Amino acid sequence: MIKHWWNGTFIPYDNDDDSGVFLMGGTYRRHWSANVARAVVSFLSREWKWVIGTSLAVLGLAMSYARFF
């Protein structure tokens, strides 16, 4: 079920019967939330070093704020 949501449904290219050209392949139609999840995973896989550093800095600031108040 999750795999189908992540991959989407395969839509093959529409070939004209009268044409001498045959197109192979197609596209995937994905749910909007799968597109958002793919964008987030793609961003995290490219920018993981910045995300980890920023997360640790924000966590440190939150801990020091909680310690003083």
Image (cartoon, grey):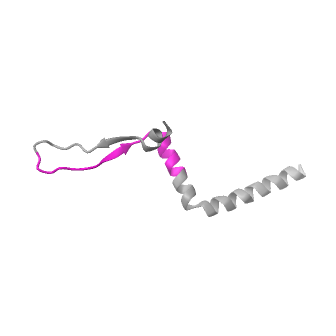
Q: Please state the extent of the stretch shown in magenta in the rendering.
A: 19-40
Residue at position x 28%, y 49% in the image: 25
Any magenta on residue 21? yes
- Specify the farthest residue to the right: 68
Decide which of 28, 66 is in the foreground and name it: 28
Lateral position of residue 45 relative to residue 26, left or right? right
Vertical order, 56 against 38 (above or below) = below
On screen, residue 29 versus residue 37, left or right, reads left
Asked if residue 4 is positioned above or below residue 58 in the image, the reply reads: above
Residue at 10% over, 43% down: 18
The question of residue 22 being in magenta is answered with yes
Q: Residue at x 50, y 49 (%)?
A: 38
Please say if 52 is above or below 33: below
How many circles with numbers are drawn on the protein? 0
How far across and how far down the image is residue 15, in percent?
19, 44
Residue found at x 52% / y 46%: 37
Q: Nearer the viewer, residue 65 or 21?
A: 21
Q: Position of residue 48 (x, y in %)?
A: 60, 60
Q: Quadrant of residue 17?
A: top left
Relative image position of residue 40 (x, y in whole percent): 54, 50
